[in-house]
């Protein structure tokens, strides 16, 4: 599963419950193209009726297994739209396994862009496939949470980290 760039398309769509709120998944018919976490009781495409395809059903099953603690890695075809810089960040995020974490600085170093913490943070925050591509596993250099763009923000990130057994710095 390597995120690759793709033009926007009319999405297929499914919504599924989760312990962190409803999730909204979209697809181009062959790949999962986005995952949104409910924020304030709303999802980006709430007004659009669901229209599922097999890849979304597979994603829903794998997410259910993840939340049950039975799945640690996702095996899904995904396509994420973004710049080449964002793609490099998301590809590196995809290599971070369940229960592991990294820092923004380490992430920059890993992709050959040391000292680009602000840009790294922007790319992490723009990840269109949170949970599947584990952006919640990125912490500050001191091991603290500095933010999270999914769901209800930091409480959502804390839940995901605790679910994976990632212990934060005191």
Image (cartoon, rainbow, N blue to C red):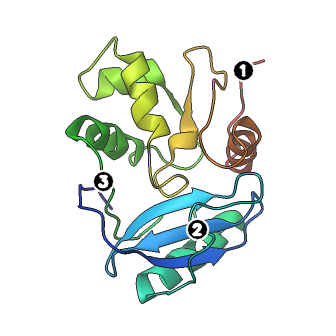
Q: Nearer the viewer, mark 2 or mark 1?
A: 2
N-terminal label among 3 and 2: 2
Name the residue that disc number 3 marks: 81
Q: Quadrant of the C terminus?
A: top right
Q: Position of residue 140 (x, y in %)?
A: 57, 20
Q: Secondary structure at mark 3?
A: loop
In the displayed structure, 140 sits above or below 94; it is: above
Name the residue that disc number 2 marks: 24
* Quarter where residue 166 is shown: top right
Q: Alpha carbon of mark 1 to alpha carbon of mark 3: how far? A: 33 Å
Name the residue that disc number 1 marks: 169
Category of crowding for the residue at label 3, using alpha-carbon neighbours closer than 10 angstroms: few (below 14), some (14–19), many (at least 20): some
Q: Alpha carbon of mark 2 to alpha carbon of mark 1: how far? A: 31 Å
Residue located at (37% from left, 23% from top)? 119
Q: Nearer the viewer, mark 1 or mark 3?
A: 3
Q: Position of residue 104 (x, y in %)?
A: 46, 23
Q: Is residue 42 left or right of residue 75?
A: right
Q: Secondary structure at mark 2?
A: strand
N-terminal label among 1 and 3: 3
Q: Do residues under tags 1 and 3 come within 8 Å of each other at their CB atoms? A: no
Q: Alpha carbon of mark 3 to alpha carbon of mark 2: how far? A: 17 Å
| Closer to the camera in the image, 11 or 167 | 11
Residue located at (56% from left, 84% from top)? 50
N-terminal label among 2 and 1: 2
Q: Is residue 119 left or right of residue 21?
A: left
Q: Position of residue 56 (x, y in %)?
A: 48, 79
Residue located at (61% from left, 46% from top)? 150
């Amino acid at each position: 599963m390597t995120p690759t760039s793709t033009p926007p398309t009319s999405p297929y769509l499914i919504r599924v419950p989760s312990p962190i709120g409803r999730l909204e998944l979209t697809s181009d018919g062959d790949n999962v193209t986005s995952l949104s976490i409910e924020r304030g009781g709303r999802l980006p495409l709430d007004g659009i009726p669901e229209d599922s395809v097999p890849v979304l059903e597979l994603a829903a099953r794998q997410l259910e297994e993840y939340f049950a603690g039975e799945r640690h890695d996702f095996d899904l075809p995904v396509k994420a739209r973004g710049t080449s810089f964002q793609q490099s960040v998301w590809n590196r995020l995809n290599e971070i396994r369940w229960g592991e974490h990294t820092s923004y600085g380490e992430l920059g170093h890993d992709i050959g862009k040391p000292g680009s913490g602000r840009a790294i943070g922007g790319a992490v925050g723009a990840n269109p496939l949170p949970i599947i591509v584990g952006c919640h596993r990125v912490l500050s250099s001191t091991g603290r949470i500095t933010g999270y763009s999914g769901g209800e923000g930091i409480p959502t990130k804390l839940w995901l980290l605790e679910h994976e057994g990632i212990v934060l710095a005191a």
